[in-house]
Structure formats: structure tokens, C-alpha cells
Amino acid sequence: MKLHQLRCICEVVDHQLNVTDAATAMFTSQPGVSKQIRLLESELGVPIFAREGKRLTAITEPGSEIIRAARRMLREAENIGRIGADFNDQTRGTLTLATTHTQARYVLPPVIQQFRHRFPDVFLQIRQGNPKQICEMALRGEADIVIATEAVSASDGLIALACYRWHHCVLVPPGHPLLDKTDALTLQDLADHPIVTYDFAFAGRSQLNDAFMNAGLQPKIVLTALDADVIKTYVGLGLGIGLVADVAFDAKRDADLRRINISQLFPASTTWVGIRRGSYLRRYIFDFVELFAPHLSRATLRAALNIE
């Protein structure tokens, strides 16, 4: 049994049993991956995958257990490499962060600036996606930490730590009639206007939907987007009012829009940092998390990760 064989079966699972895609991700050939899987199955004496002809169609019952064990072994092999790198040089390495556009664009820049000043020799990678996508990146070991509002706390494979709470706000062009109601704005007032907001997977969107539903209202959502910059663009064009994270509004950069506080209408959202269970964190990753959320000190994080 070889680690390469374990990587092959895990990659095949991660690519929905498509051996060609798994081989591409591993920078090898499809026949090579298929051969390694057959060798591993022969050694273990049980099939890991069910087949129709040459096509893999399902994971067998023993295959499910083997894949779970393989993922644990691969994580530990990865951890061993990180431990060696950490004790060899604590100031060099790579930090891969998976996050959403709102965090990367509006919240993380000062944190990254401080981190780069403190660790100039650490290569930083930012991978963006929707909350589900970036959580999957962390679970597959493609990211060291994930930062998002949705999905992180609901992922069984991640240890989720609350970072900060925030509210939504309404963005409108100058002269919009809602600006005359800022002291007594209601959900009905919002529902009376076309709305431009986040895609359902993003930034507290489920809380917005729940609030309207509980009030017996059906909002007129005319356009959804993956990030606040796109939403603001279409609000400026007059397509509707914008519902965005409060942190996404900058009075100087967004001088052509006006912000309305609606913290009384919707519950606060929580942004989380997620770390894959069983991961070994390089020491500079502890520093990054503390820069992002100062209450998550090294001691607090180690306790949450059950590190003695």
C-alpha cells in the first residue's frame, strides 16, 4: 500500500468517480490512476468501487471505510511534512486562505497587509468561491483556513470559530424615496421596491429570506450576484435597492450611493473561521487568525483544536 494509491482513490471520489478528471488533477494519466486503484484493491482483497465495464459507478461498502481511513492517513502524512517545515523555518512557507469576495475585498486587506509585514517570506494564496465551495476546499486540504459567514459552522469536518458579527444595510441612489423613511423603515417598505442582493449561498442571504417569510412578505428580488461590487453597480443603474453586508459600503468609494441602516430589521450575521479537523497548523497561521480576530489568541485556538 502506497500513499500515492490512497491519493488516487480520494481524488477519484472528489471528482465524482471521473478517473480522467482525477488524473488531470494529479498531473498523471488516466490509465496510471486506474492501475493504482486496481493494485490497491488486489492487495486489500475487496473492491473499493463498483463498475459497469471500465466505468466506476459507485463506492462499495468496504470502499467507504477505506476512503475514510485513506483521508486520515493522507492528512497525517501532510501534517508530518508541515511539522518538519515548521521546525526547520518558522518564517517561510505557504498560507492558503479560502474565502468569499466580501471578506477578500473589504475585510481582509488590512489583515493581510499586517501579516505580510510580519512574515514577508510566507507566500499567501487567496482562493475565492461561494461558502460551500470554499468549505470543500478546506475539507480537501486545498486551503489551510476558510473564512465565511455561511456554511462554515454547519460543516462537520471543520472546527468553526466565531470571528465577528455584522449587519446588512440598504444601498440606494441619491434622492431615493426610502431616504425619507430611514427613522421608521419597515420590511414592507423594502418589499415594495425591486431588490438586488447576494446569491442565495452568500453572506446571510438565508436570514434575509427568513425575515421576509416570517413577516408574510414576498420580496421582489430582480437580480442576484456573487459579490457586493456587482450589486452596487446595478443599484447605481437604477435596477433596484441593494441589500449588502454593511462592511461592503465605503462612503468615499461609493459616493454615488447612500447607505440606510437596517440593523433593526434583520438579525446579525456571524463570520467564522474554519479549520479542517486534525490539521497541523504552521505557527504563522495562528498569527494570521489572531490578526483577523484578536480574541482568537494562540492559546484559545490551540484549546479549540485540542492541541496540548
Image (cartoon, rainbow, N blue to C red):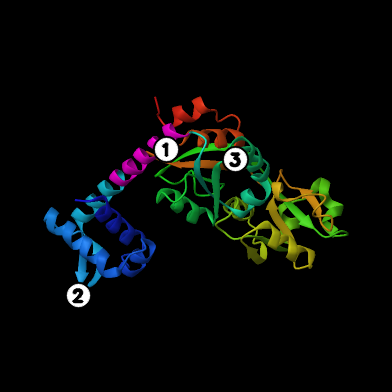
Which of disc 1 and disc 3 is earlier in sequence?
1
Which of disc 2 and disc 3 is earlier in sequence?
2
**Label of residue 85 in the image:** 1
- Disc 3 marks a residue whose amino acid type is Pro
Q: Are marks 2 and 1 in contact (CB under 8 Å)?
A: no
Q: Residue at x 53, y 41 (%)?
A: 273
Instruction: Write down the region rendered in magenta.
Output: 73-89
**Residue 20 placement, left or right of 148:** left
The residue nearer to you, when weighing 73 against 160, is 73
229 falls in the magenta region: no
Distance between mark 3 and mark 2 Cα atoms:
53 Å
- Disc 2 marks a residue whose amino acid type is Gly
**Between marks 2 and 1 in the image, the one whose residue lies nearer the viewer:** 1
Distance between mark 3 and mark 1 Cα atoms:
17 Å
84 falls in the magenta region: yes
Q: Residue at x 72, y 58 (%)?
A: 242
The residue nearer to you, when weighing 270 against 95, is 95
Which of disc 1 and disc 2 is earlier in sequence?
2
**Residue 187 placement, left or right of 141:** right
Task: Residue 308: give x, y in percent of width and height.
Answer: 39, 24
Neighbour class for label 1 at 10 Å: few (<14), some, many (≥20)?
some
Q: Quadrant of residue 60?
A: bottom left
Q: Residue at x 83, y 45 (%)?
A: 183
Task: Residue 195: give x, y in percent of width and height.
Answer: 70, 62
Task: Residue 67: give x, y in percent of width and height.
Answer: 26, 52
Neighbour class for label 3 at 10 Å: few (<14), some, many (≥20)?
few
Residue extending farthest left: 45
- Most common secondary structure along the magenta stretch: helix
Residue, disc 3? 120
Q: Quadrant of residue 228?
A: bottom right
**Label of residue 53 in the image:** 2
The residue nearer to you, when weighing 139 against 242, is 139
